């Protein structure tokens, strides 16, 4: 297997082959996800909730992201893995200036990330261009942006009204024009993300709670293993619960493999169950 590269991801988007993304925060899970065929591993700042017990991603630091990015990178390397590693720029580490964003992104790239992800549209376009011009691939993130949950008024669907959908689309095009090559769309109506996926030809959309017609899908690892301590959002599917019950024969690796297959063959997500 050849390492996953940016041209390959964009070529998959052009061909219509689904891109599979999954979060991982440590070496073992990263190696297992890689072996199961996950193309993009996201070191998400969801680790704030999943690993650190925080109530939101707002409190995650750059040092924490650096540490987990390093752990994931080592795990992938150890098994001669091929996954493309995306790492979240946490809240407050790219908001001050483009220069601050570059300094923060360099920390994650030097920890082993291939790409950084940042949330939001509008003001972020200039920051994305600044990073991309300096050789740092960028994944955008629109719709429900958890770092700004307090401003959004909760974890709720975005882009439902005509005005908010128009704004989201404008932001998406600005981010593509600025050089973003992947774009997470979180909790947006399926019709909106389908339209954007067609419109954006050199930026591949990765949906979570955004319906089935995106270029790829992402889930939080612990959610898809049924380890969410709270209420599971509607967009989650528990791939662990669906495995045939043969003791000792099936486990986490098989659940992740089932997720990869379901995304590839289009059976996950199901717009009737996991979308708006
Ligand atoms: O931090 C994270 O896990 C994410 C995904 C939910 C897209 O940003
Ligand atoms: Na995140």
Image (cartoon, grey):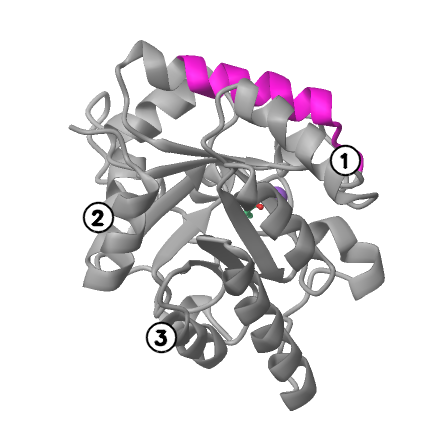
Disc 1 designates what residue?
Answer: 100
> Does residue 47 appear left or right of residue 97 in this picture?
left
> Which mark is first along the chain, 3 or 1?
1
Q: Quadrant of the N terminus?
A: top left
Between 171 and 69, the one nearer to me in the picture: 171
Residue at the bottom extreme? 162
The range drawn in magenta is 59-74
> Does residue 182 appear left or right of residue 38 in this picture?
right
Vertical placement of 41 versus 242: above or below? above
Q: Give the distance between the C-alpha atoms of the residues marked 1 and 2, in whole angstroms.
A: 39 Å
Binning the other alpha carbons within 10 Å of mark 3 as few (below 14), some (14 to 19) or many (20 upward) gives: some
Label 1 or label 3, whichever lies nearer to me, is 1
Binning the other alpha carbons within 10 Å of mark 1 as few (below 14), some (14 to 19) or many (20 upward) gives: some
* Secondary structure mostly seen in the magenta stretch: helix
Disc 3 designates what residue?
Answer: 198
Q: Give the distance between the C-alpha atoms of the residues marked 1 and 3, in whole angstroms.
A: 33 Å
Task: State yes or no: residue 62 in magenta.
Answer: yes
Disc 2 designates what residue?
Answer: 261
> Which mark is first along the chain, 3 or 2?
3
Between 35 and 6, the one nearer to me in the picture: 6
Between 216 and 105, the one nearer to me in the picture: 105
Q: Give the distance between the C-alpha atoms of the residues marked 2 and 3, in whole angstroms.
A: 23 Å
> Which mark is first along the chain, 2 or 1?
1
Residue at the left extreme? 1
Q: Judging from the image, what secondary structure is the residue with disc 3 in?
A: helix
User: Could you say which quadrant of the image residue 64 lies in?
Assistant: top right
């Amino acid at each position: 297997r050849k390492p996953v590269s940016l041209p390959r991801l964009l070529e998959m988007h052009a061909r219509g082959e689904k891109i599979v993304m999954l979060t991982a925060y440590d070496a073992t899970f990263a190696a297992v996800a890689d072996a199961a065929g996950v193309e993009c591993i996201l070191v998400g700042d969801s680790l704030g909730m999943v690993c650190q017990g925080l109530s939101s991603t707002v409190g995650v630091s750059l040092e924490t992201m650096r540490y987990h990015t390093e752990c994931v990178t080592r795990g992938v390397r150890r098994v001669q893995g091929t996954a493309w590693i995306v790492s979240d720029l946490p809240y407050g580490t790219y908001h001050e200036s483009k220069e601050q964003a570059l300094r923060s992104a360099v920390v994650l790239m030097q920890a082993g990330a291939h790409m950084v992800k940042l949330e939001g549209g509008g003001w972020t376009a200039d920051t994305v261009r600044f990073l991309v011009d300096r050789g740092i691939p960028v994944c955008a993130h629109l719709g429900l942006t958890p770092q700004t949950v307090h401003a959004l008024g909760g974890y709720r669907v975005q882009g439902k009204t005509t005005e908010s959908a128009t704004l989201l689309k404008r932001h998406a095009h600005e981010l593509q024009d600025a050089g973003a090559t992947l774009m997470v769309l979180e909790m947006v109506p399926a019709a909106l993300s389908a339209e954007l996926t067609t419109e954006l030809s050199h930026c591949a959309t990765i949906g979570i709670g955004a319906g089935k017609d995106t270029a790829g899908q992402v889930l939080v690892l612990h959610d898809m293993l049924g380890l969410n301590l709270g209420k599971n959002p509607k967009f989650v599917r528990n791939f662990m619960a669906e495995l045939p019950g043969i003791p000792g024969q099936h486990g986490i690796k098989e659940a992740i493999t089932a997720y990869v297959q379901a995304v590839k063959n289009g059976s996950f997500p199901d717009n009737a169950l996991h979308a708006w």
